[in-house]
Image (tube, helix red, strand yellow):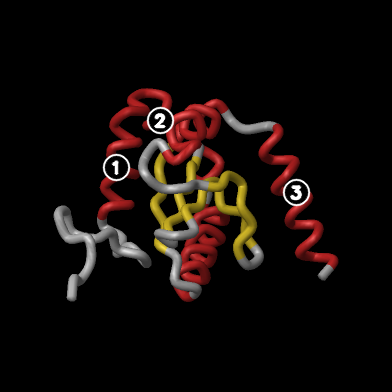
Amino acid sequence: MAAKGMLRDRARGMRKQPSQAEHIVWELVRGRQLGAKFRRQHPIDNYIADFACIDAKLIVEIDGRSHDTEEQRLWDDQRARRLNELGWRLFVVRDDDILRDAPAVVERITSELRATPSPCPLPLAGKRGLRS
């Protein structure tokens, strides 16, 4: 239990000091602007997801140059495998891409959301239920 509490505390600290790219993405996805609720710096298993949409089981990870090392790539691959085992889909985007063209990145996130089957599908337009 202590490990979960430490992870939660670390996530809180990370929310207080986002990178520039994380701040930009948060401003564009918060408040269900994309039609889905995102949480930022959200603990999942033994990891902290930059952004997680619980309903869509979609994680958005923002990676900078620190992820270019071989050691970090191995760790990222291990994290991706574990999160996939838990049923999560991982969408990784470079921070440079966000800083260069944030609207295009948000469009790609929106596409990922659309590709996710909804756990609670909305009724078809004009169909309000069965009448007897």
Q: Quadrant where the C terminus lies?
A: bottom left
Q: Secondary structure at mark 3?
A: helix
Residue type at tag 3: Arg
Q: Secondary structure at mark 1?
A: helix
Q: Is residue 12 left or right of residue 93?
A: right
Residue type at tag 1: Arg
Q: Quadrant where the N terminus lies?
A: bottom right
Furthest-front residue in view? Answer: 132
* Front in this rendered view, residue 41 or 117: 117
- Which one is in front in this view, the residue at disc 1 or the one at disc 2? 1
Q: Which residue carries the number 1 mark?
A: 108
Q: Which residue carries the number 2 mark?
A: 98
Q: Which residue carries the number 3 mark?
A: 10
* Front in this rendered view, residue 45 or 55: 55
- As displayed, is residue 21 above or below residue 67? above
Looking at the picture, how far across and down is residue 19, in whole percent? 59, 30
Identified at 74% across, 57% down, the residue is 7
Residue type at tag 2: Ile
Task: Please tell me which of labels 3 and 2 falls first in the chain.
Answer: 3
Query: Tags 1 and 2 in contact by the CB under 8 Å rule?
Result: no
Identified at 14% across, 55% down, the residue is 126
Whole-Å distance between the Cαs marked 3 and 2? 24 Å
Query: Tags 1 and 3 in contact by the CB under 8 Å rule?
Result: no
